[in-house]
Amino acid sequence: MSENIIRVSHLGKSFGENEVLKDIDFEAYVGDVISIIGSSGSGKSTLLRCINQLEKPTSGAIYFHGKNIQDQGFSLSDYRTKVGMVFQNFNLFNNLSVLQNCVVGQVKVLKRDHETAEKRALDILEKVGMAQYIQAKPKQISGGQKQRVAIARALAMDPEVLLFDEPTSALDPEMVGEVLNVMRDLAKSGLTMLVVTHEMDFAREVSNRIVFMDEGVIVEDSTPDEIFHRPKNERTKVFLNRSLRAR
């Protein structure tokens, strides 16, 4: 078996009286492409935000290469360069060009010289089909193009894991495909990916594992074939029937 890269142990997260995550146990291995599916409010995005430490867990632990990321002395800034995140609303710097968006983190966080950072950014922007827009500002490009820039920006930091929080949910339908195609290429490259998504075709075709969440718990964690064709839990069956019918 490949190396365990992220391990979530007995994770809980509450907002006041609202218990959003309940005793979550979960592992991701090097090269995994894991789609996390479930209804809105099931805890999917909160799980990703806890893994990235944008939310502090109420209980439990998260391990990266066997080290507890909440231990005193653990460098969260170093961790976040290795575990990058792509948000549904892009989170680009609107005052910077496409190229600058992909350079600034490398220079400030990784301490790369500007020439090296720019070369890396140009290479990745070429791969995601955005090389011709390097001087454009975010307001001058479409939603799908913004998301491709956001993915390029995350990749420029040379992450070991990329977390995607519903990366296509803010896009017009005709722009979804261009982003999913970039993500398919990333999956083929061997990058470890955790993807919160409502795109069932992507989940079925690209993932090697699917995690189904409902009401703050992981109900099933298995292969796409098992989840889509032989789900073990009635809640999984109901969700998939509803999702596939809606599509």
Image (spheres, helix red, strand yellow):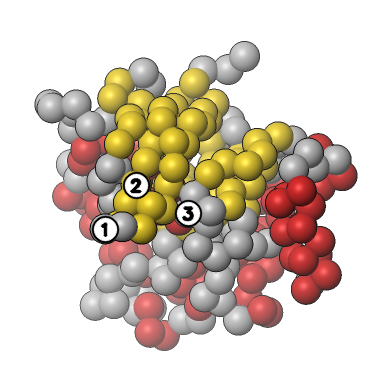
Tag 1 secondary structure = loop
Quadrant in which the C terminus appears = bottom right
Mark with earlier residue (1, 3): 1
Please, is residue 13 above or below residue 25 in the view?
A: below
Residue drawn at (58%, 17%) of the image: 2
Tag 3 secondary structure = loop
Q: In this view of the protein, can residue 156 be seen by the observer?
A: no
Please, is residue 210 above or below residue 73 in the view?
A: below
User: How much space separates mark 2 and mark 1, taking CA atoms?
Assistant: 10 Å
Identify the residue under disc 1.
16
Residue drawn at (55%, 71%) of the image: 169
Identify the residue under disc 3.
43
Toward the viewer: 97 or 176?
A: 176
Mark with earlier residue (3, 2): 2
Toward the viewer: 132 or 110?
A: 110
Toward the viewer: 71 or 18?
A: 18
Q: Which mark is residue 13?
A: 2
Please, is residue 29 above or below residue 36 in the view?
A: above
Amino acid type, callout 3:
Gly
Amino acid type, callout 1:
Gly
Residue drawn at (18%, 32%) of the image: 75
